[in-house]
Amino acid sequence: MTVTVTTWHLEQTAPDDLVPAAAPPEEQRVRIARAEVVSPEFSRFLYTSVGGDITWTDRLGWTYGQWEEFLGRPGVETWVAYERDTPAGFVELDAQAEGVVEISYFGLLPVFRGRRIGGHLLSYGTARAWDLAERWPGRAKTRRVWVHTCSKDGPYALDNYRRRGFRVCATEVGEEPEVSTPGPWPGA
């Protein structure tokens, strides 16, 4: 059995394209910090916890070594949102050639969705994509930030990207095998 999936590729081509979201209320005690130590365990936890109910499956088969290799590449950064010191979500940046940075993953754990954290985290992560070269000597200054989302992602994903100033630059429609929710455990 297959399902029709629409994928949107979005981009910003200047730092001024970013339209920041308001920060969550102060009483939520939301903070965002970079995970600076390469930790396949932590990154896999974030990936499966955020993507488990929206069928993120492309990295489920990765070995420890594959996670370690990817996370150890210069210009790969994981920024984690915490609410009251509990991991709430993450944004993963992947510096590519010629000043291009991909937001390779972005999302919130299900319990933290709808709490005004997503727009704030996306704003913060996009700003970090624009200033990524400042943290990685020898990298070209960022000239483009891009991301893709699809119809399998959360119902507010595409609108959140657009509200942050991303513009659709390509759209694809295709058939994919229907996959049950992968986890981190059934029903999560």
Image (spheres, grey):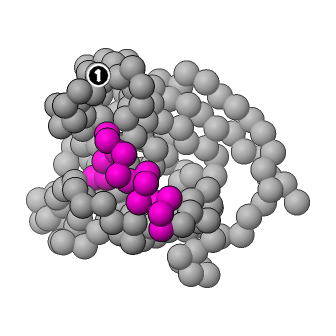
Mark 1 packing: few (<14 Cα in 10 Å), some, or many (20+)?
Answer: some
Image: 2 above or below 65: above
Q: Does dot 1 land on a helix, a strand or a loop? A: loop
Q: Nearer the viewer, residue 136 or 169?
A: 136
Which of the 4 quarters of the picture holds residue 13? top left
| Stretch in magenta | 64-79
Q: Is residue 177 above or below residue 21?
A: below
Any part of residue 80 in sight = yes
Q: Which picture quadrant has residue 12?
A: top left
User: Where, quadrant-wise, is the N terminus in this rendering?
Assistant: bottom right
Image coords of residue 5 (percent x, y) = 72, 45
Q: Is residue 99 above or below residue 89?
A: above
| Whole-percent x, y for residue 61 in the image | 61, 65
Which residue occupies 33% across, 19% down?
Answer: 143
**Is any part of residue 162 visible from this angle?**
no
Establish if 161 lies above or below 4: above
Residue in front for this viewpoint, 35 or 180: 35
Q: Is residue 176 left or right of residue 133?
A: right
Q: Give the residue at the far left of this rendering.
A: 26
Q: In the image shown, does 139 or 27 lie closer to the viewer?
A: 139
Residue wearing tag 1:
140
